[in-house]
Image (cartoon, rainbow, N blue to C red):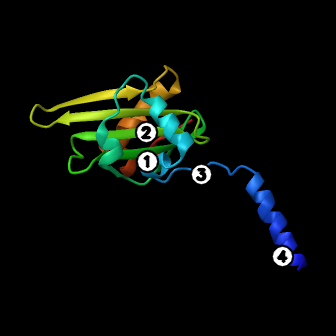
């Protein structure tokens, strides 16, 4: 009976202590968290979020990068059956309070690519963050993960 009472107290204590935010393993997993989803939507500001992100996104496993000694998770998604043309890469700070991104729309017929930078404020996220986000779009981050540790 003593063990049951102890287990009950531990469970009760665990229920009253807020859980630490877990690092997203993909864009899809991040969007399942209400706070992260709200930060994600805020990151878009006045930019219209493409419908494919909610309805047709294909996601890849998260990658890690470092900017000014701070850890970031890099998340990637593309439009199902149209990955070459419609892509999104997102940088999320370790505690989830900072989020930056880039939307890419490409037209292979015209050999053009349009990039829309999201939530860039002119700090390190603009300098090194753009490099990391573009590398996520091109596959370079995946191929050379150790090269994106900006101290």
Give the CA distance from mark 1 to mark 2: 8 Å
To which residue does mark 4 refer? 4
Q: Are marks 1 and 2 in contact (CB under 8 Å)?
A: yes
Give the CA distance from mark 1 to mark 4: 40 Å
- Tell me the SS state at disc 3: loop
The answer to whether 36 appears left or right of 75 in the picture is right
Within 10 Å of disc 4 (Cα), the crowding (few <14, some 14-19, many 20+) is few
Q: Quick one: which residue is furthest to the left in this view?
A: 109
Give the CA distance from mark 2 to mark 3: 16 Å
Q: Are marks 1 and 4 in contact (CB under 8 Å)?
A: no
To which residue does mark 1 refer? 27
- Tell me the SS state at disc 1: helix
Q: In the rendered image of this protein, does residue 83 appear above or below residue 150?
A: below
Give the CA distance from mark 1 to mark 3: 13 Å
Q: Are marks 4 and 3 in contact (CB under 8 Å)?
A: no
Within 10 Å of disc 2 (Cα), the crowding (few <14, some 14-19, many 20+) is many
Give the CA distance from mark 4 to mark 3: 29 Å
Disc 2 versus disc 4: nearer the observer = 4
Within 10 Å of disc 1 (Cα), the crowding (few <14, some 14-19, many 20+) is many
To which residue does mark 2 refer? 90
Horizontal and vertical percent for residue 93?
56, 38
Q: Earlier in the sequence, mark 1 or mark 2?
A: 1
Across the whole image, how many numbered discs are drawn on residues?
4
Disc 1 versus disc 4: nearer the observer = 4
Q: Are marks 2 and 3 in contact (CB under 8 Å)?
A: no
Along the viewing direction, whichever of 33 and 110 lies nearer the viewer: 33
- Tell me the SS state at disc 4: helix
To which residue does mark 3 refer? 22
Q: In the rendered image of this protein, does residue 142 appear above or below residue 51?
A: below
Disc 4 versus disc 3: nearer the observer = 4
């Amino acid at each position: 009976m003593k063990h049951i009472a102890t287990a009950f107290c531990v469970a009760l204590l665990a229920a009253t202590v807020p859980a630490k935010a877990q690092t997203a393993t993909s864009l899809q997993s991040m969007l399942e968290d209400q706070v992260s989803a709200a930060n994600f939507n805020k990151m878009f500001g006045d930019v219209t979020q493409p419908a494919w992100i909610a309805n047709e996104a294909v996601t890849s496993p998260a990658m890690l990068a470092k900017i000014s000694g701070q850890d970031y998770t890099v998340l990637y998604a593309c439009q199902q059956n149209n990955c070459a043309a419609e892509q999104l890469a997102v940088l999320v700070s370790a505690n989830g309070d900072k989020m930056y991104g880039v939307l890419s729309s490409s037209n292979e017929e015209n050999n053009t690519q349009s990039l829309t930078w999201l939530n860039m404020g002119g700090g390190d996220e603009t300098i090194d963050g753009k490099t990391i986000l573009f590398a996520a779009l091109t596959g370079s981050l995946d191929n050379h993960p150790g090269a994106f540790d900006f101290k």
